[in-house]
Image (cartoon, rainbow, N blue to C red):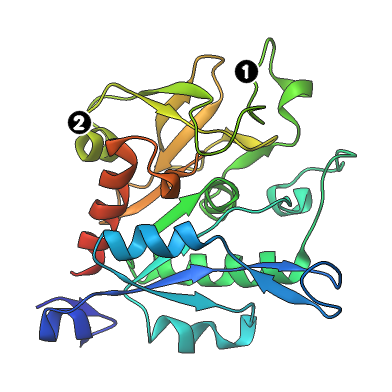
Amino acid sequence: MSARNGKTTKAAQDGGRPTIGVTLDSEEPGGYSKFPWYAVRQNYADAVVKAGGLPLFLPHEPDQVADYLALIDGLVVTGGAFDIDPSLFGAKDKHPTVKLKGRRTEFEWKITQAAVERDLPVLGICGGQQLLNVVLGGTLIQHIPDEVEGPLAHEQPNPRDEPGHSVRIVSGTLLHKITGAASLAVNSAHHQAAKSVGPGILVDATAEDGVIEGIEDPRHRFVLGVQWHPEFSITTGDEKIFKAFVDAAKG
């Protein structure tokens, strides 16, 4: 049996699927609804289910973080077309391309921080990795073309369900143990990335231009961030990431 906050998880008790909290994106009125609305791609849920988990979507209610954590066995922090407030990692200026979603960031910050403190498995994806990196004490590149010499097309022109470039995986890291690979072909949909990492955090993957593509915290049983979108299952490595995460959530 596994314990979370001193209690045996439901998944450990009955051998069932662990409940995986999945954060939502939010949009202003327009398009789907004339009122504010939440959104998430279906393949996030598909990837969790295929890996053996039960997805539970989490609306942005910062005051309900403790209640959410009582329900879930693991947390996926998803991506989205927005950025983390640069003031959260000590930047004095905000790049013109930066787009904020304050309530989403407030909620994801609080639930990610609390999940890490409780040793709950956390998987940060794309923007979710960027948030995880800042929560863990790191900083961000605000706009890759302005800070990286000769950058790859990290906002790839081809469809997101195809690879855009490859990443090199650091031997001996959790990511390497999960994938069993020295490199992976990945999709790419971001203009920001981790710049520095916090104390004790490992960089486990980089792109050919040196951009950080993966981070992990070895002090916890599973705290992993990837800059790409493994929910698209472009490679078997992507599926292994979700499987290892859900298995960790089982306890």
Q: Indicate which disc residue 214 carries.
A: none
Return the residue at label 1: 152
> From this viewpoint, is residue 201 visible?
no
- Residue 196's place in the image compared with 72, above or below, is above
Give neighbour class at mark 1: few <14, some 14-19, many 20+ (Cα, 10 Å): some
In terms of depth relative to the viewer, which is nearer, 5 or 81? 81
Q: Position of residue 58 (x, y in %)?
A: 54, 77
The residue drawn where x is 23% and y is 65% is 52
Could you tell me which secondary element the residue under label 1 belongs to? loop
Could you tell me which secondary element the residue under label 2 belongs to? loop
Q: Position of residue 70 (x, y in %)?
A: 38, 86
> From this viewpoint, is residue 58 visible?
yes
Residue sticking out furthest to the top: 150
The residue drawn where x is 17% and y is 79% is 16
Q: Indicate which disc residue 180 carries.
A: 2
Q: Quadrant of the C terminus?
A: bottom left
- Residue 154's place in the image compared with 193, above or below, is above
Q: CA distance from mark 1 to mark 2?
A: 25 Å
The residue drawn where x is 47% and y is 53% is 124
Q: Which amino acid is tagged 2?
A: Gly
Q: Position of residue 231 (x, y in %)?
A: 43, 50
Give neighbour class at mark 2: few <14, some 14-19, many 20+ (Cα, 10 Å): some
The residue drawn where x is 76% and y is 53% is 85
Query: Can you tell which quarter of the image residue 174 is in?
Result: top left
Residue sticking out furthest to the right: 96
Q: Which amino acid is tagged 1?
A: Leu
